[in-house]
Image: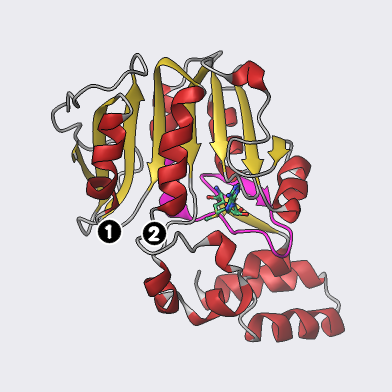
Amino acid sequence: MAAEDEARDLLVKARGDTIALDALVERRLTGEPLAWILGHAPFDGLDILIDPGVYVPRWQSTELVHRAVARLPADGTAIDLCTGSGALAQAIQRARPRARIVGTDIDDRAVRCARTNGVTVYEGDLFDPLPASFERTVDLIVAVVPYVPTSAMHLLPRDTLAFEPALFYDGGPHGTEVLRRVVAGAPRFLRPGGALLLEVGADQPEMLQEQLESLGYTDCAAWSDEEGDYRGLEATITCGCPSRSQNRPDLGRVGSGRVESSRPI
Ligand SMILES: C[S@@+](CC[C@H](N)C(=O)[O-])C[C@H]1O[C@@H](n2cnc3c(N)ncnc32)[C@H](O)[C@@H]1O
């Protein structure tokens, strides 16, 4: 965000109180995320409440939202794993008001924040807190999990490292530890024909391909950003029985317009 825009937002927050403004500017100068200071952040045209300590949703995740909306029936059911503030769940819900969308998160600050945002959230590790009634009924599972390789954590922006916990980002040695657990756990909850949409990075789609295929996912495809870097993958669960992938042809340019392509993994 441009410095002038940040200054304007801080002025609005201070409501003419110069002492309060000084304190807000002081916090921002330490590198504290603007959204934590303001208490909210924009996401896909929505204004999301963000409590201090809760992950600030990134515009890059809007592509995942648009793809999720395209795949979710009007009265379908979706799970947003690692929901954070519940930003993705809210954006999907806005487009599919009759759908049932729930989130899970392991961090109690995130759970409180998402609930304040009106999202139904179960607190716990990935799928663990979900009621058994969701099993084999869910149309869509979306997730922006921690997927940064541990060895690349030091490359994150200085302010990120100073303020945000590794819990948001650290995905283990290849960044795929949590992604793999999601891929393994999703078939228990997806109905036949249900889809898994994940935000990913680098070469993670190829790293996950064998696991996806061995678990019976089909139509595995990945999309990239305008630099050609992978940003996400989607896959469909068919019968839950192992099969070879039936990759589909290039899906073309979809969603936010920032995405260059989607192609079979
Ligand atoms: C990168 S943030 C994404 C948040 C949100 N989906 C978004 O895009 O704004 C990752 C979130 O995953 C949560 N998380 C990390 N490990 C988890 C786990 N094992 N089970 C559930 N949530 C987890 C963190 O608390 C954090 O809120």
Q: Count residues near mark 2 (Cα–Cα under 10 Å), then give few for <14, some for 14-19, many for 20+.
A: many
Q: Position of residue 116 (x, y in %)?
A: 78, 44
- Taking the image as shown, residue 117 lies to the left or right of residue 175, namely right
Question: Looking at the picture, which amino acid does disc 2 mark?
Answer: Gly
Above or below, comparing residue 161 to residue 9 in the picture: below
16 in the magenta segment: no
Which residue is labeled 2 in the image?
Answer: 175
Above or below, comparing residue 92 to residue 6 in the picture: above
Q: Is residue 65 visible?
A: no
At 15% from the left edge and 33% from the top edge, which residue is drawn?
250
Q: Is residue 201 visible?
A: yes
Which residue is labeled 1 in the image?
Answer: 202
Q: Count residues near mark 1 (Cα–Cα under 10 Å), then give few for <14, some for 14-19, many for 20+.
A: some
**Mark 2 and mark 1 residues within 8 Å of each other at the beta carbon:** yes
At 65% from the left edge and 20% from the top edge, which residue is drawn?
132
Above or below, comparing residue 81 to residue 146 in the picture: above
Above or below, comparing residue 183 to residue 242 in the picture: below
Q: Position of residue 156 (x, y in %)?
A: 44, 74
55 in the magenta segment: yes
- Taking the image as shown, residue 7 lies to the left or right of residue 254, namely right
Q: Which mark is residue 217?
A: none
Q: Quadrant of residue 153?
A: bottom left
